[in-house]
Structure formats: structure tokens, C-alpha cells
Image (spheres, helix red, strand yellow):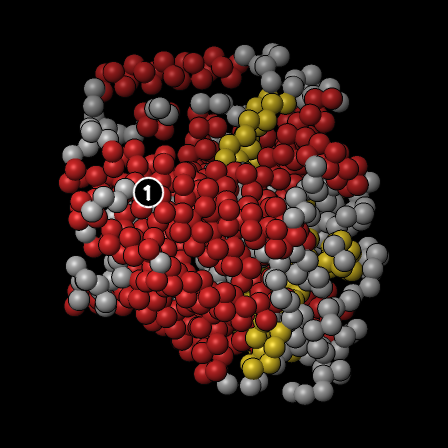
Amino acid sequence: MRSILDLTSSRANGVRMSGAVLLAMVACLCACSRSQGNEPIKIGVIGEESSVAGASLTKAALLAAEDINANGGVNGRRVQVITYDNHSSAAEGVRAFQRAVSEDKVVAVVGSYLSEVALAIEPWSARTRVPFITPGASSNDIPKRVHDDYEHNKYTFQGTTMSEHIAQSICDFSHDVLVKQFRLRKAVVMSEDAAWTTPLDARYLECLPKAGLEVLDHIRFNPDTTDFTPIFNQIERQHPDVIITGISHVGVQPTVQWHDQQVPIPLAGQSSQATNGTFWKDTNGAAEGVITRNTGAPGVALTPKTIAFVNAYIQRYGLPPAYCGYTSYDMVHVIAEAIKRAGSTDPDKLVDALEKTDYVGTSGREQFYGRDEPFTHALKYGPGLVTGVHLQWQNGKQVAIWPADKANAKVEFPAFVKFPKQASTK
Amino acid sequence: MVGLQILIDGFAISALYALGAVGFTLIFGVSGVLNLAHGGIMVVAALIGWFTAGELGAGTYGGSLLGILAGLVCAYATYLLVVRPIQRSRAIPHEESEIFVLTGTLLWGIMIQTALAYKFTDNPVTMRPLFSGVVNIAGVRTPRNEIMIAVVCWLVIGLLWLLVNRTRAGKTLLAASMNPRGLTLLGFELSRVHLLVWSIYGLLAGLAGVLLASFLGVGPNNTGQLTASAFSIVVVGGMGSVSGSLLAAYLVGYLETMTAYLVAPTLRPIPALLLLVLVVYVRPQGLLGRR
């Protein structure tokens, strides 16, 4: 398979031949871009089919396309979602992106919940000038690169809450619940060593003390870790009141081992796998008491669209959407809305329209930061926009515990978790 | 306190490594097969065990038994679909058949891993512990399940020793590992011996997979790591030597545990690999190897 990109490289094999082919392809491209008519608008969606979160991404996108088409499409044209599987590999993600652009001729790509993959695709989005929105990768670097080299990287958007804001949300929660309600004072930060946790941890270390929690230690472990006993041991020896996590590649194993070993310290923070509806079954109930931040929680109407979407997803696929299902669904709509406003699928016009996005989706009111702001094209965070909720697993269900206006349950911990005012030995 | 913690934690992990490695070395010693689908068989057992226990409602005991059975079936599939056809093929010269078997089992292992990931996603799964709760051993809080796992591993290894050294079938296995040709001259059916050893291997690998799921949790992404782990333990201990594998399993298990506790959890796999390099350099036949 030769792509346009191969042809533009400066190899001198048969210059005349490649020149002729190049001319033919350019002619074809011009012809193709002119013939819009009733051809469907193709949107590429790159997910990780073997992972719970990544599979949710593609399923939700397909649902979004159906909803758009049921409501008349975009200016009379159907939306067609073409899905790809990147097998959780950055190299395959890039290949999928190249295929989507050059072979399948998509006008935009929604892709990946892994920051490593999204960061690898970002330069290709710039080179091919095809808008790329990640509905799940939260690394700060994604929008930062847009800000630092706007003219090239402006085609990339981040459709999910940035790591830094995730951390801030967790600090705010810690202040309201852990410090004020449970009077906890000391914390240990435990994160996997991955691209998305670098800015997360940096913000944790900065805002947790301001929230009232002294950070005793900061542990970054290899995402391939399978035995967490030494890590929990190391943490316990320092006697913190809470473990603030930043985990996504792992989740089942540390949670189960935390439960089996009855580590007397509660888990809070971000545990992406704990946001999945299947987490209770995956851990055989060890998830009891685990707290995590999420885009949404069952039964919580973040917007008038949230619950309808969740029900439709469950009815269609038999299980609730993962966190990037909400955002993937929203981002396909955001692209469709932008195409409507721009009146065309031309990349630069599309980018302009995307920048003006003000869309109420399933996870909140979605807008992107602008060129002058430090994290250009990141999702705006703040009251009235996309705030997320904190949830806790209780008796097989996810309940919302924060913020107060969205909470539908009180925080409860399993019996083996001990708190400073109740502990008898130290 | 940390010392006792290391002692206990290391013991359980080493016992689990030993169970897996013993099967691996048995297959090599008797059948001459380096089964690189070893991790795959363990993970199949773990996932089927989890699936039947939870989704199909068989409960922990039922699920564990079904998981071990699944490991057995997978071992048979490996032997009958991959290993035996290559060994019997006339197109492959006899000296090269081992390499082909190695490659065949490697690819088979990858196929298993990918199929499992598509059916079950790559999320690790855990089996509900047979005994829940913790026990306090001189100040070290140990899950009861961990103790049970160590006990079961050693029971099974003991049973295996009895089988190999005290029963007729077992002695046939031993003989086959020393001199297969001599064995056929005495009138024994080699194909039956192979079937027996693969049956034992399937049960061992299946049990190891189910226990691992109950202790730490396991998923399709661990397949390669489990095979590599068993492989390096068997090389250090001596290919084909069961007692060598036991010794090496404990050596590697404790090295890893000490590194995780005393140095850094991230550096856990490194000392075992350094030991492997050292052994291959200084004593290539392994600590207790015969050839």
C-alpha cells in the first residue's frame, strides 16, 4: 500500500514515474474534493478493541453516527463511522491514522484513550492536515503542543478533561470530603509511570497540600507491575491516611490485592478501570469502597442528554459505557456540528468551526481553549462546563459522592480501612 | 519486620513459580519440547476459571476445576495441533524439528493471547479467594489465600514426586527422559508416554494459572511474561531437572521479592535476568542440569 506520503518523499527511483503518479493523485484529490453531493461524511474512529475503555470508544461513536443520521444527517449527508483497532500500540495507531486518511478518505479522526497513542498521532494530524480529536487521552502535552506550534498542530483537539484538571478536581474533592468530613491529614500519591500521570502527579504534589493533605511520599510504579504487595507495604510503613492514585493501565490487580491484603488505607484519586461498569465483576467485589473521579456516574444527569445516552448504550451493547464512551459520543457530535456550521469539510474551515464549539453533550458543556491560552484546544474545565463527578463503589453499584449537588449517596469504607480517630494502634 | 514480610511473600510467589516451572521442565525433559505457549495455557485456565466461576455461576471451586480442565484441554490442543504434527512431519529434517516446534508453540501462544484478548478484553481477572481474610504471622498481615496457595503448590509438587519416583507410569516417564530409544526397545509405547506427560503438564499449568489468578490476578497481556519467567527459571535450574527447577524457582522468587522490597518495585525482574546471564555464562547446563 503506497500512501500519498510515500510519494512525496525525495527518493530518486524513477522520477518520471513518480512524477506522473503524483500528478494523477493530485488530480484525483482535486476531483474528489469537489464531488460532495450525497456522499457520506466519513469519520475515522481509532480504538483499542481489546481494552474495556478503548472498545467503548468505538461503540459509542457508532451510536453517535446512528443518532445523527436518524436526525437527518449533516446538511442532508449521512455520517459514516469507520473503525480501526490499534491494539494499544502507538505504531499501529499511527498506521491506522494513515490508512484512515489516505485510503478511506476520512474528514476527521476520533482516536484513542492512551496518551502515548494520541501523542504519536498528533504530528501526523499536522502533516496530513486532518482534524484529530482524542476523547480519552489526558496528557497535558497534547494541547501544549498545539499552543507551542499552532500553525502546524492546530488540527488536534483534546475532547476529554486534561490531567492537570483531573488532579485539580481530585484536590477539590479531597478538601471537601477527605479533609473536612473525615479529617484526614496525610496522603501518599501512587501512580503508574505513564505519559498522562506526569502532569497529574505534578499537580497533585502542588494542590494536595493546599487542600489540607500533606504528601508523605510519591510512588511511580511500572505499569507492568503485577505484584503490588511491596508497594502497599512501602506505603503502609509511612502511615498515611489515604492513598491518592493515578492509575489507568492497571486497576484490577492493585485493587484486588489491596482488598485481599486488607490494607487499612482508603483508595481515592483517579482509577480509570474502576470507572468501568464491569469493574465489580472483574474484581469479584474487591472494588468495595474504591473512590475514583469519572466523567459521569450511573443515574447522575450531568446534562439532559446523559441518562438517555447511557440507556441507549446499555440497550444496544449490554453494558454501560466506559468514561471515554461519553466523550467519544460527544466528539462525533461536535465534529458533525462543526461541519454544519462551517458548511464544508475543508480542514482549515473545520478547525475554525471546532474552535467555536459550544456544545452541550452527555458529559457537560463542551468548549475548547483558544490560541492565546496555554493549553490550546484542550477541553475547558470549570463550573458550568465539564466538571466530572467522584464516585464510589458500594455493594456492586457506582454511587456519586461529590460534588454535593450531584451526590446521591454518602461515603462509606470497608471495615478493614482504619481512620486516625478510630485507630487504636499506630 | 520487612525481613519476615519478604520471607513470607517470597515463599508464596516462589511456590507458584515452581509449579509452573516444574511442568515446563517436565515437558522438555521427557518430550524434548520447549513449549513457548506455556503462558498461554496458564492464562486460558485462569480466564476460563474466572468466567465459569462468575458469569456462569459455577462458584469458586467449580470454576477452579473447570479452569484446570481448560488448561488440560489447551495442553492437548497444543500437543495434537501444533507439536505432534511438526514432530511427525516428513517435510522437516529431524535435526531442525526442535526449532520448528519452538517457533510453532511461540506462534500458537500469540494466537491464544490475541484470541483471549478479543473474547475477554485484556483486563486482568481475579478468582475469588477460596479462603478470605488475613492471618497475623508474628506481626505480618498475610492473606489466608496466600498460605493456601503455597500449601497447594507444595502438595501437588509432592504428589508429582511420588508419581515420578514411586509409580510405574512415573518411572516410565523418567526413563523416557533419559533414553527414549532404550524405552522403545523394552516394548513401551512412546506415544502413550508423551500423552501422559502432556496430561500432567496440562494439569500443572492449569492449576498454576488458576492459583495465580486467585493470588495476583492475570490477564492476556501477562502471557509472554509468564513464559519468559518459566523459561529463565528452567534454564537456571537445568533443563529437564525437576529438582533444579524447584531450586531455581525459589532462587528467582526470593531475588525478585528482595529487589521489590529493598531496592525498588520497578526493578523487580532485573536480578533474575542477571542471574540467568550469569548461569548461562558460568554453568550453561544449569545448577542441577544433566546434559
Picture coordinates of residue A233 (x, y %)? 54, 76
- Left or right position of A241 against A395: left
Residue at 24 percent of width and 31 percent of height: B89
Picture coordinates of residue B210 (x, y %)? 52, 55
Quick check: A381 above or below A62? below
Quick check: A311 above or below A278? above
Residue at 27 percent of width and 61 percent of height: B241
Q: Quadrant of residue B188?
A: top left
Q: Quadrant of residue A260?
A: bottom right
Picture coordinates of residue B29 (x, y %)? 26, 54
- Left or right position of B210 against B236: right
Residue identifier under label 1: B192
Picture coordinates of residue B192 (x, y %)? 32, 42
Residue at 68 percent of width and 62 percent of height: A290
Q: Nearer the viewer, residue A388 or B207?
A: B207
Dot 1 amino acid type = Arg
Q: Is residue A20 visible to us here?
A: yes
Q: Is residue A119 visible to us here?
A: no
Mark 1 is surrounded, within 10 Å at the Cα level, by few (under 14), some (14 to 19) or many (20 or more) other residues, namely: few
Secondary structure beneath label 1: helix
